[in-house]
Amino acid sequence: MSYPHSEIRKRLKFPQERRSVMFMGEYRHSLDAKGRLIIPAKFREQLGERFVVTRSLDHCLSIYDMASWEAFADRLEKIPSNAQKQREVVRFFLSSAAELEPDKQGRALLPANLRELAGIKEDVVFLGCGKYCEIWSKEQYEAHESSISQEEISKIAEEMLSGGFTF
């Protein structure tokens, strides 16, 4: 009898192969009175039982599944610490990082310091950004979106990609 590769792995109790993570889409939610946030179901599936949230460069928060976070943290650890600017970058990301576990309803308590750093009071926007996702306050996200035109995005893409990528 022939079994597919994934069935053999299950029968032999091998861990499942990890699929590549790809966060996509935009989701809107609100904090509850206790500071908990419902993580979108599509994101929960990819994030797993534990994940890391930290501040980001764009006045929002970034969420990483554990494997992506470990790879990111490894890169940060390799930054030499002999210069002030390098220490500041490492400090920026690692000092605010928090490991979260959603409850059975898919809610996770977003630490007060992270809510404050991102200006999150109630309404939030989740954005899928490929290997990670972002959490924005609704107001910050709308201001950010209105500050960048489609023409600017096209120009940035053209400069970054140098004609080597088509849509």
Image: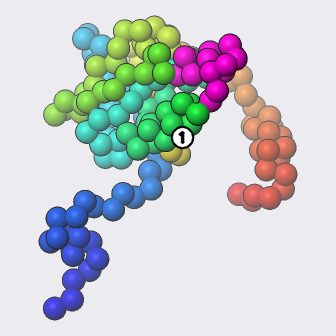
Q: Nearer the viewer, residue 1 or 128?
A: 1
Q: Residue at horizontal 19%, vertical 30%?
A: 103
Residue 105's spot in the image, x, y percent? 19, 32
- The answer to whether residue 163 is left or right of residue 106 is right
Q: Residue at x 26, y 30 (%)?
A: 101
Which residue was labeled with disc 1?
129
Q: Horizontal and vertical percent for residue 121?
A: 41, 10
Number of marks in picture: 1
- Closer to us: 131 or 68: 68
Does dot 1 land on a helix, a strand or a loop? loop
Q: Nearer the viewer, residue 54 or 157?
A: 54
Residue 165 image offset from top left, x and y in percent: 75, 58
Farthest front residue? 82
- The quarter of the picture where the N terminus appears is bottom left
Choose between 154 and 92: the one closer to the eye.
Answer: 92
Q: Is residue 13 left or right of residue 161?
A: left
Q: Using the rendered image of the protein, determine whether residue 133 is visible from the camera's viewpoint.
A: no
Label 1 environment density (alpha carbons within 10 Å; few <14, some 14–19, many ≥20): some
Please, is residue 147 above or below residue 14 in the view? above
Tell me if residue 146 can be seen: yes
Please tell me whether residue 30 belongs to the stretch shown in magenta.
Answer: no
Magenta segment main secondary structure: helix
Residue type indicated by callout 1: Cys
Q: Give the magenta-colored segment's residue range.
A: 79-93
Quadrant where the C terminus sits is: bottom right
Q: Residue at x 49, y 33 (%)?
A: 73
